[in-house]
Amino acid sequence: MGEAKGVESFNGDGPWCLIGDFHVVRDKEEKRGAKGVLINDSTEIKEFNSFIDDMNLFDIPLLGKHFTWFSSSRNAVSHIDMSCESIMFISMAEFNSICV
């Protein structure tokens, strides 16, 4: 998430997107099986959602797998890889989902 913070100085004009492994979920339902919930999870979720809202981005839904990260033992899963686009990017690209 720290790397994405530098994007806030970008004025956002034109079509653009952020795609990657953000190491944070947007909702607690996007993380299962981890031993306990870290205290700062709620803060990170709020900060990440505020960042997406402040940048006027849309989190494009995934088709196929709901989770994008699996622990080696497969007992913990998360949805930490995502694609967030500006409305101009979405309208030019003419898509509304990403297949995983």
Image (cartoon, rainbow, N blue to C red):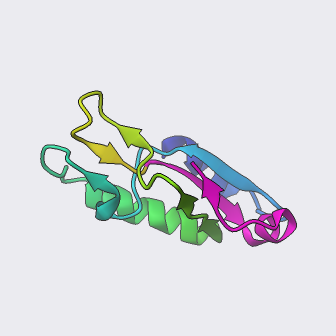
Q: Is residue 75 left or right of residue 25?
A: left
Residue 84 occupies quadrant: bottom right
Q: Is residue 24 magenta?
A: no
Q: Residue 64, percent across and down?
A: 52, 55
Which residue appears farthest toward the left when viewing the image?
A: 36
Residue 17 on image: x %, y %: 71, 55
**Is-magenta flag for residue 96?**
yes
Whole-percent x, y for residue 98 in the image: 63, 56
For the record, the magenta segment spans: 80-100
Q: Nearer the viewer, residue 13 or 36?
A: 36
Q: Residue at x 81, y 67 (%)?
A: 94
Position of residue 6 relative to residue 86, above or below, is: above
Left/right of residue 54 with respect to residue 17 in the rendered view:
left
Query: Residue at image x 56%, y 59%?
Result: 63
In the current view of this chain or complex, which residue is farthest to the top?
72
Q: How many marks?
A: 0
Residue 47 is situated, as x and y percent measured from the top left of the image, at 42, 61
Q: Quadrant of residue 27?
A: bottom left
Give me the residue at 31% from left, 45% from top: 77
Residue 95 lies left or right of residue 56; in this view the side is: right
Q: Is residue 26 left or right of residue 60?
A: left
In the displayed structure, 88 sits above or below 23; it is: below
Furthest toward the front, the residue is 64
Rendered residue at 42%/51% (across/down):
79
